[in-house]
Amino acid sequence: MTEHVFNVLFLCTGNSARSILAESILNREGRGRFRAFSAGSQPRGAVHPFAIDLLKKMNHPVEQLRSKNWDEFAADGAPVMDFVFTVCDNAANEVCPVWPGQPMSAHWGLPDPAAAEGTEAERRFAFADAYRMLTNRIGIFVNLPLRALDKLSLQKRLSEIGRDFTQSA
């Protein structure tokens, strides 16, 4: 018997940095148990070059990454999501499409590295910091005993993961 692979969608407004990083991290950390996707409400149309550079440096495949609209995942024939996470405050406050299957959702907001200012080194550091925060949150998520938790307990824990790291960041 094959174990269910959970589909996870990471949402952000532009789908050029945070959600792309999260998609890549979960696809590696959750391989075999999770399949990650990302999208945005107003996609920029391209993945930020600093995100691509960082992911390559961290040995993530980048060939299939693209900035896409979240409507793609609400359309007929789209993968049914088990979890939906917003990783930016704008997307958390927007009216999302109705996701088939009523996935669990939580907000894991973090600063937008694409909006960072300063020298190139400071801007790249913002991407590395976002990568670190997402790696920590996703590491906790992939190790939750999903099958053993009831839906209400799991929903509460998913929200706590975002708050725990937001308060300590």
Image: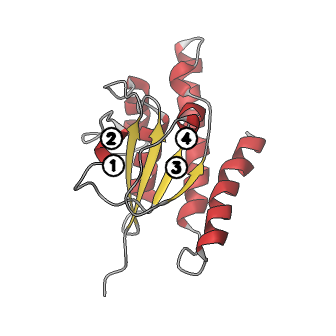
Residue 166 in which image quadrant: top right
Q: Are marks 1 and 2 in contact (CB under 8 Å)?
A: yes
What residue sits 50% from the left and 23% below the top?
114
**Quick one: which residue is furthest to the right in this view?**
167
What residue sits 56% from the left and 31% below the top?
90
Q: What label sits on residue 87 in the rendered view?
A: 4
Give the quadrant of the N terminus.
bottom left
Q: Is residue 126 above or below residue 152?
A: above
CA gap between label 1 and label 2 equals: 5 Å
Amino acid at the residue labelled 1: Ala
Q: Is residue 123 left or right of residue 11?
A: right
Residue 55 percent across, percent down from the top left: 41, 38
Amino acid at the residue labelled 4: Val
Sooner in the amino-acid sequence: mark 2 or mark 3: 2
Q: Is residue 132 left or right of residue 41?
A: right
What residue sits 32% from the left and 26% below the top?
46
Q: What label sits on residue 33 in the rendered view?
A: none
CA gap between label 4 and label 3 equals: 6 Å
Q: Quick one: SS at disc 2?
A: helix
Amino acid at the residue labelled 2: Asp
Q: Which residue is mark 3?
A: 85
Q: What label sits on residue 71 in the rendered view?
A: 2
What residue sits 60% from the left and 52% below the top?
137
Sooner in the amino-acid sequence: mark 4 or mark 2: 2
Closer to the observer: label 4 or label 1?
Answer: 1
Residue 17 percent across, percent down from the top left: 45, 32
